[in-house]
Amino acid sequence: MAAFLKKYKRMILFMLVYWFICFIMLFADGSFLYAMLSWNTLLAVLPLFFIKKTEITCEQGKTSWSFLWMILWLLFFPNSVYMVTDFIHISGDKFLWIVEAEKYSPNRGVVYGTDIIIWAKLLVIGIGFIFALLVGLESLYIFEQNVKKKISKRIHWPVVLTVALLSAIGVYIGRFLRFNSWDILFRPMRLLKQVIAKIDGFAVQFVFVFFLFVIGSYILYKALREVINQKSDWI
């Protein structure tokens, strides 16, 4: 834990600042949403911690522990991409509306909302989502690198695609069926029954679209990572 905190101290500091902002917004807006956002960012950091533990125990030759930490990483990884669904909480807010205007009027009848709270809510959700996504993609990158190094370079992309698919399924289960990552350990039969009962066309479409989102985000993340690394080498 100490080594993790030392390496990612800036990330942890950012998360604490984010929690403080959520605390302020909780009182300013009076919505429990901000407590949920704080909790979601914590859940998003756990996969990074778990994959680092997987890496360390694997290097120490503790195969059983390494496998356990990897399973925990896989179970909690969907939390890091889940936060994009929190944007649904702005659906009831009015950011703009149309009013009657004279023909050729420069404002075209569009009026933007001036309630700073709803704009602040949008930004808080957005910052939390970006933070959670980047932390999650970093954990996926570490996982992929270990697969290439410890197992085979040929299977790393099939493994990443599998993780993305399982993550998309996990997000659907979390958002629509309201199960948590740990329910697969403590309520597996109930979870399985609900998944089977709720499979329909929308579920398949949602999983497919979210699968593309995870893969697209990861490809972009890797591309940006390579550019940054190249720039660092040049400097």
Image (tube, helix red, strand yellow):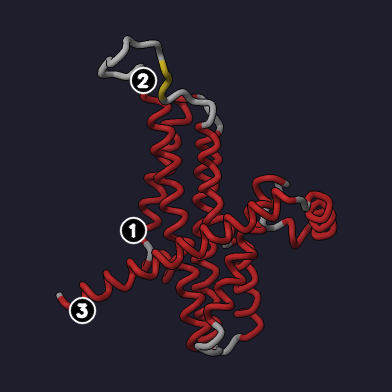
Q: In front: mark 2 or mark 3?
A: 2
Q: Residue at x 39, y 65 (%)?
A: 221
When the figure is inspected, residue 110 is found, relative to residue 131, above or below; the finding is above
Please give the residue where the numbered disc 1 appears in the rendered image: 10
Say few, some or many: other residues with alpha carbon within 10 Å of mark 3 (under 14 / 14 to 19 / 20 or more): few
Counting residues from the start of the chain, the first of labels 3 and 1 encountered is 1
- Report the amino acid beneath label 1: Arg
Q: Residue at x 53, y 81 (%)?
A: 156
- Report the amino acid beneath label 2: Val
User: Do callouts 3 and 1 mark residues in contact (Cβ within 8 Å)?
Assistant: no
What label sits on residue 233 in the rendered view?
3
Residue 10 lies, in percent from the top left, at: 33, 58
Q: Residue at x 42, y 35 (%)?
A: 122
When the figure is inspected, residue 14 is found, relative to residue 33, above or below; the finding is below
Residue 204 lies, in percent from the top left, at: 69, 55
Q: Secondary structure at mark 3?
A: helix
Q: Residue 175 versus residue 41: which sits nearer the camera? A: 175
Q: Residue at x 45, y 65 (%)?
A: 218
Q: In front: mark 1 or mark 2?
A: 2
- Report the amino acid beneath label 3: Asp
Counting residues from the start of the chain, the first of labels 2 and 3 encountered is 2
Disc 3 and disc 1: Cα gap in Å? 22 Å
Disc 2 and disc 3: Cα gap in Å? 49 Å
Q: Secondary structure at mark 2?
A: strand
Is 127 positioned to the left or the right of 214 in the image? left
User: Do callouts 1 and 2 mark residues in contact (Cβ within 8 Å)?
Assistant: no
Please give the residue where the numbered disc 2 appears in the rendered image: 110
Q: Residue 81 versus residue 162: which sits nearer the camera? A: 162
Residue 67 lies, in percent from the top left, at: 64, 79
Is 211 positioned to the left or the right of 24 in the image? right
Q: Secondary structure at mark 1?
A: helix
Is 57 positioned to the left or the right of 221 in the image? right
